[in-house]
Image: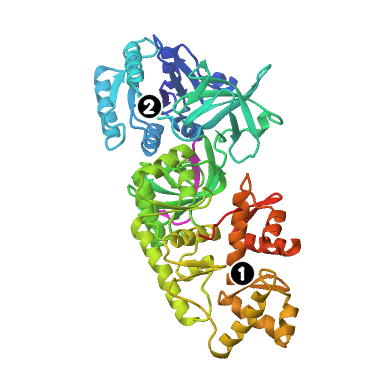
């Protein structure tokens, strides 16, 4: 369990941690000189038995160092909220409580310190003030424990309380890719670079390859120290130090705010969609495009608030926003964030990240807002169902997986349990619920019916143009996968590079039909090895240019195939050659299609065999693998 202090400056946070653990967390010379916590301090309270120790993060209380406070409470499990009995709640008490509330820290205890300085009446008065302060926050029901760190009153009871909480604490699920928010880095002679921070998700083991988010290089984890103990692994919810090693690694590569991750695809983002809660005490609404400071994990950057649902967000309310950042952050769905004003003197609000892949345009469109609301659910399965229902063009599955930091196995398990259709490959995949898929299916049929009516002499449309005309602007590879999926049930038929309905057959009419029969007869007269374009033109006594133009039209009808600049084949010849190609591959021990074997089987010569196979590659019938080919799409 990770516990962080919170509270106003000089209310006794550091002394209380020292009394509880024996560790003085003020480690910097300037902190010793000024008697003031400036940066984060760390201590551990060992527990009897085999339970792991409680990790403490001591945060500064001075308003000048609020960025360090936010860094310290990111990703904690329990709050030790400190209020001095002589002062009572002060400005930073209120701001720290607001930050804990915005980040959703639900568990904690109130340490009412310096009780040796006040009377019983004053103590009762301050308790009442604290209870009033906590109303409506995540710590509303937190216990208030009076203590005196100087005299030791109440310290044992507080320690026992924290110990009991730690033993009853359920460790966070270690799902997702490993993510550690770096808050310190330093060198140790003989060991090398050490980075420390809170583990937000996943598990890391000694020997694993990790990287600094945003950088391509990977480094090896030489050793791990988690919760102040040497371990073979570290997981979500632990204070962890990683000893990293690798070529070119030095402390200048890593800074506070960086992330150490195991995901091979995760990248920092310059913008994310979120729900922003504005504090009730704000003097005015948060307007669109307001400049702010954004705190996330151990990082801070400036940016703008793009209000999505209205022109502004009133104090005490929430709204959907897009945070547009000046420097990228390593955010993922569910991460907490805090925003402060442009001069970084006042906390304005905060919330949790919803989606790290917002669109380039139309960020406030109704369809986009519906999708953001669907993605807001913290439950992955619920969010997946709702998001596919809200995605007329299919949900980007890879973006969903990455935004929610799911491993491949976790996402595959999620997919297998969902009644959702996934189309495309792993990198370019769309998810459709049944109504959306049927709607897409119907749009394709309707589009082809209209196309055939307007262009009866043409075969049909290629994958991408067909999907575009049907109203779906998908990446080319996804459009091709969608068309192939619809093709499987026989709704549409692929003819060369075009798609058509089974009821449609393009062809020539009148004199053109008679001419085609004559041309086809000449092309097919020599079996699978017809003469060149010039040879056919001579036999027809027709100008070669006119013949080529006519054959181009025959190609649009699906009747002729141009396999090279000088040679055309009919559909029946292509069908026969495909069958021979499949037979040749089947007879090979490795199932490979070799040019020489294909040449011998067809008796068309090496040059034409190469032309035909390259044409088959173009149509997707075959795919080249080094010196041979494999059959990608059997004829039957």
Magenta segment boundaries in residue numbering? 286-297
Q: Which of 594 and 115 is in front in this view?
A: 594
Secondary structure under tag 1 reads helix
Q: Do the residues labelled 1 and 2 touch (CB within 8 Å)?
A: no
| Residue receiving disc 2 | 79
User: In the image, what residue occupies the spot 57% across and 90% down?
Assistant: 511
> Is residue 601 visible in this depiction of the protein?
yes
> Is residue 283 visible in this depiction of the protein?
no
Q: Is residue 111 left or right of residue 444?
A: left
Q: Nearer the viewer, residue 13 or 476?
A: 476
Q: Is residue 511 left or right of residue 602?
A: left
User: In the image, what residue occupies the spot 30% across and 33% down?
Assistant: 133
Give the label on residue 197, or none.
none
Residue 322 rendering spot, x and y as whole percentages: 46, 52
For the residues labelled 1 and 2, the Cα–Cα distance comes to 77 Å
Main secondary structure along the magenta-highlighted residues:
strand
Residue 28 rendering spot, x and y as whole percentages: 58, 21
- Count of picture labels: 2
Residue 221 rendering spot, x and y as whole percentages: 60, 25
| Residue receiving disc 1 | 573
Q: In this view, does 375 lie to the left or right of 251?
A: left
- Work out whether mark 1 precedes mark 2 in sequence or the reverse, and give the earlier one: 2
Image colouring = rainbow
């Amino acid at each position: 369990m990770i516990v962080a202090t919170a509270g106003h400056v000089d209310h006794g946070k550091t002394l209380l941690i020292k009394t509880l653990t024996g560790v003085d967390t003020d480690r910097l010379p300037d902190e010793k000189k000024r008697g003031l916590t400036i940066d984060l301090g760390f201590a551990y309270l060992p527990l009897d038995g085999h339970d792991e120790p409680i990790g403490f993060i001591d945060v500064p209380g001075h308003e000048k160092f609020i960025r360090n406070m936010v860094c310290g409470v990111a990703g904690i499990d329990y709050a030790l909220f400190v209020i001095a009995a002589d002062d009572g709640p002060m400005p930073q008490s209120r701001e720290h409580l607001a930050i804990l509330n915005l980040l959703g820290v639900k568990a904690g205890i109130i340490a009412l310190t310096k009780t040796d300085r006040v009377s019983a009446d004053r103590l009762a008065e301050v308790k009442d003030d604290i209870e009033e302060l906590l109303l409506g926050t995540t710590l509303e029901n937190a216990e208030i424990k009076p203590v005196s760190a100087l005299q030791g009153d109440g310290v044992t009871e507080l320690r026992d309380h924290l110990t009991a909480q730690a033993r009853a604490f359920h460790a966070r699920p270690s799902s997702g890719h490993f993510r550690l928010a770096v808050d310190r880095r330093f060198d140790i002679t003989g060991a090398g670079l050490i980075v420390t921070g809170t583990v937000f998700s996943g598990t890391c083991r000694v020997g694993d390859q990790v990287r600094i988010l945003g950088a391509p290089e990977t480094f090896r984890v030489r050793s791990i120290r988690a919760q102040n103990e040497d371990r073979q692994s570290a997981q979500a919810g632990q204070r962890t130090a990683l000893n990293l090693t690798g070529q070119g690694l030095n402390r200048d590569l890593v800074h506070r705010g960086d992330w150490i991750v195991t995901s091979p695809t995760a990248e920092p983002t310059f913008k994310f969609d979120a729900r922003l809660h504005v504090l009730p005490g704000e003097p005015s609404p948060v307007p669109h495009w307001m400049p702010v400071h954004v705190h996330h994990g151990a990082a801070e950057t400036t940016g703008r608030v793009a209000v999505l649902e209205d022109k502004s967000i009133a104090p005490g309310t929430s709204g959907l926003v897009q945070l547009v950042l000046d420097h990228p952050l390593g955010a993922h769905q569910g991460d907490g964030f805090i925003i402060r004003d442009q001069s970084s003197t006042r906390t304005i609000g905060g919330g949790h990240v919803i989606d790290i892949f917002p669109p380039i345009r139309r960020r406030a469109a109704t369809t986009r807002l519906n999708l953001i609301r669907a993605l807001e659910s913290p439950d992955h399965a619920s969010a997946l169902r709702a998001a596919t229902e809200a995605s007329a063009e299919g949900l980007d599955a890879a973006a969903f997986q990455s935004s929610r930091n799911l491993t491949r196995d976790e996402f595959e398990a999620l997919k297998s349990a969902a009644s959702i259709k996934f189309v495309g490959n792993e990198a370019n995949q769309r998810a459709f619920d049944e109504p959306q898929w049927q709607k897409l299916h119907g749009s394709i049929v309707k589009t082809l019916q209209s196309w055939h009516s307007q262009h009866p002499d043409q075969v049909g449309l290629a994958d991408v143009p067909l999907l575009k005309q049907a109203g779906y602007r998908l990446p080319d590879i996804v459009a091709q996968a969608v068309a192939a999926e619809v093709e499987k049930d026989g709704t549409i038929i692929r003819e060369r590079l075009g798609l058509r309905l089974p009821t449609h057959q393009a062809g020539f009419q009148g004199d053109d039909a008679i001419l085609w029969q004559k041309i086809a007869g000449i092309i097919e007269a020599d079996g699978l090895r017809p003469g060149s374009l010039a040879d056919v033109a001579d036999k027809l006594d027709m100008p070669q240019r006119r013949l080529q133009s006519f054959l181009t039209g025959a190609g649009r009808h699906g009747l002729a195939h141009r396999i090279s600049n000088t040679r055309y084949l009919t559909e029946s010849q292509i069908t026969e050659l495909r069958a021979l190609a499949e037979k040749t591959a089947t007879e090979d021990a490795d199932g490979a299609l070799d040019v020489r074997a294909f040449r011998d089987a067809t008796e068309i010569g090496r040059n034409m065999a190469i032309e035909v196979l390259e044409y088959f590659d173009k149509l997707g019938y075959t795919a080249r693998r080094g010196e041979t080919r494999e059959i990608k799409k059997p004829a039957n």
